[in-house]
Amino acid sequence: MPVPKKFDRRPPERDLTRINERIRVPEVRLIDEEGNQVGVIKTDDAIAYAQERDLDLVEVAPEARPPVTRVLDYSKYKYEQAQKQKAARKHQQQITIREIKFRPKIAQHDYDTKKGHVRRFLTGKDKVKITIMFRGREVTHPDRGIALLDRLADELSDVGVIEQSPLQDGRNMTMMLAPSRAVLAEDGRAPADEKKDGQTAAEKDGPTPAKKDGQTSAEKDGPTAAEKDGPTPAKKDGPTPAEHGEAVRASADAAV
């Protein structure tokens, strides 16, 4: 039995763009379908102007006085806007902020494990928030937290840079690391490296063994076993019975 979807109490999104009869102001500034400005005319006349051309009257600047309207195909206009937004989201890079927590007296093995997580996040192009948690009287020694953060940033300098210096906030000390330029440029550099080589892996490896030796393996091995043994038994022993019968019939016909 399928699990029912959780009831969403939010009202559905409405298109707030006013078109045609939803434009209630008495006058509008009209722009025709070719982008030329017609001027300020009554709203009813502007709607009739659009309907004569089988188009819509769309309010594009409602804050202007009078509002600016344009004659266009609204369905096509909405589709083009959706495609532009989709293309913008496609080229937009999203960076996620991860968080790793340390203690001032962290053991070396735990430190190495958490440092590996931070390196993995940075190579995945995510920002990492490093938090040092102080307990009890540890808060009176912030220098230990700063030393730990500086050590971590120094050991990860090849994949990350400090975006926010260590900052004390109550019993916590935080530092923000961001991916380095080398990490962010990896995707763009890979195709260039391939083009730089100028040849594929197959071309690098050189000719195949068959081409290299100048002949195929079949040519190398020489004649086949059948060729070595000589003609087949049928050819060796003479004509077949069918061939012998045809010869007898031909001689009988000739005698008649």
Image: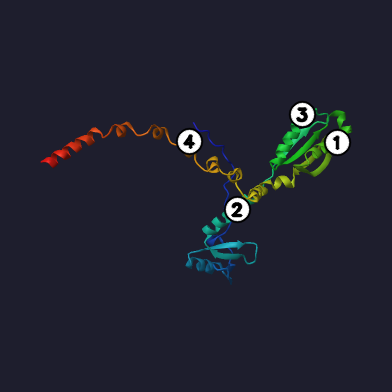
Quickly name the residue at label 1. Answer: 147
The answer to whether marks 1 and 4 mark residues whose Cβ atoms lie closer than 8 Å is: no
SS at mark 1 in the image:
helix
- Identify the amino acid type marked 4: Asp
Tell me whether the residue at label 2 lies in contact with that at label 3, contact meaning CB atoms closer than 8 angstroms: no
**Location of residue 46 by image quarter:** bottom right
Q: Left of 238 or right of it: where is 150?
A: right
| Residue 97 in sight | no
124 or 174: nearer the viewer: 124
Question: Residue 43: where, in percent of width, then height?
Answer: 55, 67
Left or right relative to 247: residue 20: right
Task: Residue 87: give its label.
Answer: 2
Which mark lies nearer to you, 4 or 2? Answer: 4
The picture places residue 226, in percent across and down from the top left corner, at: 39, 33
Q: Any mark on residue 110, and which?
A: 3
Tell me which amino acid carries mark 3.
Asp
Task: Tell which circle, 4 or 2, labels the residue nearer the N-terminal end.
Answer: 2
Q: Marks 2 and 4: in contact by CB < 8 Å? A: no
- Marks 2/1: CA distance? 45 Å
- Give the total number of marks visible in the rendering: 4
Q: Which element type, helix, strand or loop, lies under badge 2?
A: helix
Residue mark closest to the camera, 4 vs 3? 4
Q: Which residue is mark 4?
A: 221
The quadrant in which residue 97 appears is: top right
> Pointer 2: residues within 10 angstroms few (<14), some, or many (20+)?
few
Q: Nearer the viewer, residue 50 or 82?
A: 82
Kindly report the distance in space between the C-alpha atoms of the residues bearing marks 4 and 3: 63 Å
Q: How far is disc 1 from disc 3 in space, using C-alphas?
A: 17 Å
Q: Which residue is located at x 37 percent, y 33 percent?
A: 230
In terms of sequence position, does the residue under pointer 1 or pointer 3 come before the other?
A: 3
